[in-house]
């Protein structure tokens, strides 16, 4: 990012770049969008970062709404992970308890894998 800003005559502080990376979770596409917005607006400040973060939130919410329409289990999986159930078997038990129905292993694995491909959840070791 520093080099890209430098090509446009902008010398960002390390703190601004660090806040951008932290706020946008290191997602290259959003960091690129942030850089483009800063260059287009001719300023590199918290206002630009806040606007990009809000745009990212809107896009993610819209995408999740589409995902949730495909299966109610997606929402339950995310709620389970958010509630501290980070292992596959804990997620499965929680989703089944909340939904009141048995969820086949293959179905839950497929749903979880879809959330991983969308970068909504990430597997680290044996946890999500």
Image (cartoon, rainbow, N blue to C red):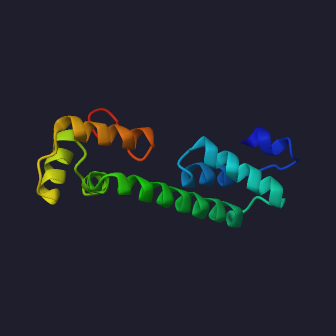
Q: Which residue, as the protein is rendered here, is positioned at the far bottom?
A: 47
Q: Is residue 23 above or below residue 92?
A: below
User: Residue 39 versus residue 59: which sits nearer the camera?
Assistant: 59
Q: Is residue 123 above or below residue 93?
A: above
Quarter that holds the C terminus: top left
- The residue drawn where x is 42% and y is 47% is 120
Q: Is residue 19 above or below residue 108?
A: below
- The residue drawn where x is 56% and y is 55% is 23
- The residue drawn where x is 68% and y is 64% is 46
User: Residue 41 versus residue 116: which sits nearer the camera?
Assistant: 116
Asked where in the image residue 117 lies, by quadrant, the reply is top left
Horizontal and vertical percent position of residue 60 = 50, 56
Q: Relative to residue 103, is residue 4 drawn left or right?
A: right
Horizontal and vertical percent position of residue 39 = 81, 53
Horizontal and vertical percent position of residue 91 = 21, 47
Horizontal and vertical percent position of residue 47 = 69, 67
Q: Which residue, as the protein is rendered here, is positioned at the far front?
A: 70
User: Residue 2 versus residue 120: which sits nearer the camera?
Assistant: 120
Q: Which residue, as the protein is rendered here, is positioned at the far top?
A: 125
Q: Relative to residue 8, is residue 87 drawn left or right?
A: left
């Amino acid at each position: 990012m520093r080099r890209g800003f430098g090509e446009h005559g902008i010398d960002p502080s390390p703190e601004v770049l660090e806040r951008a990376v932290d706020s946008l979770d290191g997602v290259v596409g959003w960091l690129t969008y942030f850089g483009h917005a800063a260059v287009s607006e001719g300023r590199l400040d918290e206002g630009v970062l806040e606007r990009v973060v809000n745009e990212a939130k809107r896009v993610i919410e819209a995408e999740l709404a589409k995902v949730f329409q495909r299966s109610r289990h997606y929402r339950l999986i995310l709620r389970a992970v958010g509630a501290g159930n980070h292992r596959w078997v804990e997620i499965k038990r929680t989703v089944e308890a909340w939904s009141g129905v048995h969820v086949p292993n293959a179905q839950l694995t497929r749903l979880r894998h879809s959330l991983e491909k969308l970068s909504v959840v990430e597997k680290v070791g044996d946890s999500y």
